[in-house]
Image (spheres, helix red, strand yellow):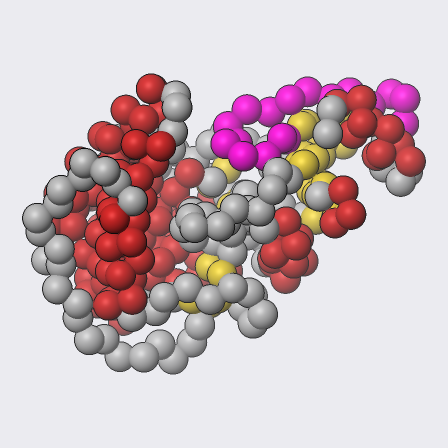
Amino acid sequence: MTEADLNIFLTGVGLVDEQASFSKLTGGFHNAVWLVEIGDQRLVAKYFSETMTGTLFPNLPVDEAEALRRLEGLDVAPRLVGFWPEVSLLVYEYVEGNMWNSDMVGVAELLLRKEAADPNGFRTVPLTSENILIEGDLLFARCASEAVKFRPKPVVIPKLGKLSLIHTDVGVNLVGAGTGLRLIDWQCPAIGDICEDIYSFLSPAFQILGGRPPLTYEQISIFWNALDRPDLAHRYDQLRASFAWRFSGYCAWQAQVLEDPNICSKYRRALTVELAYMKDAS
């Protein structure tokens, strides 16, 4: 979809008029995203590319629209304006503010607010240590020259009492601060373990891919104190090495298959720090 196509379509559904302005947004790897300004109103229009398979982060427009519907009123995600599956187009309100920067309490409180959302009906993701590790194995198997000798041992953990609507890619998709903090880009939601979302925030690899340094021990301590869920802290400690193994496999694979040398270098650095994070947890 071109900008002209987008203008014609949104005009046809009555969302914009001839006064609207469009500017392309950067940052998305797979989808075309525009900022649409109509007077004082600012919207984001996302045109989805094809659905991806064989990745930790599939591109699911129907699921993103449904996630935004279920999160409305929880002060977690942008407000959905419209979704047109026939043209793979989603429009939501623009979130004002800068990309997240060190507000640990805000993230903890957002994740707790998110727990009120109904997770039923979304794709499922592995919940056991062994199945998470197997996903990592399959990702490493795609890498022609990646030899990682240390694989964490699976651990047996209690079955979850409550499944959550999880984002799966928190670390690079936070905008704002405090009560205005929002989690954007919900194209790969799932029904799963809130610890997976916690991991995708605390993980040093996710922070590096978001263009930030890994979190400090002090920042992580602030997060857990604000979350005030020792049960989740314990569960996270048990699963951390498994999550890190899987994401290390993802980083190794991306570093080999992507074409941009700068992005490949970022994934290679993320892989190095994530393997250290994994070993520290084992």
Where, quadrant-wise, is the C terminus in this rendering? Answer: bottom left
Apparent side of residue 85 relative to residue 188 in the rendered image (left or right): right
Apparent side of residue 133 relative to residue 193 in the rendered image (left or right): left
Give coordinates of residue 153: x percent, y percent: 12, 64
Identity of the residue furthest to the front in this view: 144
Q: Is residue 129 visible?
A: yes
- Chain part drawn in magenta: 17-33
Give coordinates of residue 136: x percent, y percent: 27, 54
Apparent side of residue 142 relative to residue 274 in the rendered image (left or right): right
For residue 216, above or below residue 75: above
Image point (50%, 37%), residue name: 175
Give coordinates of residue 46: x percent, y percent: 66, 37
- Which secondary structure class fits the magenta region best? loop
Q: Is residue 219 visible?
A: no
Label tally: 0
Where, quadrant-wise, is the N terminus in this rendering? Answer: top right
Q: Is residue 252 magenta?
A: no
Image point (61%, 38%), residue name: 49
Q: Is residue 22 magenta?
A: yes
Apparent side of residue 53 relative to residue 134 in the rendered image (left or right): right
Image point (13%, 59%), residue name: 152
For residue 270, above or below residue 116: above
Nearer to me, 245 or 23: 245
Image point (23%, 38%), residue name: 144
For residue 231, above or below residue 265: below
Give coordinates of residue 83: x percent, y percent: 75, 48
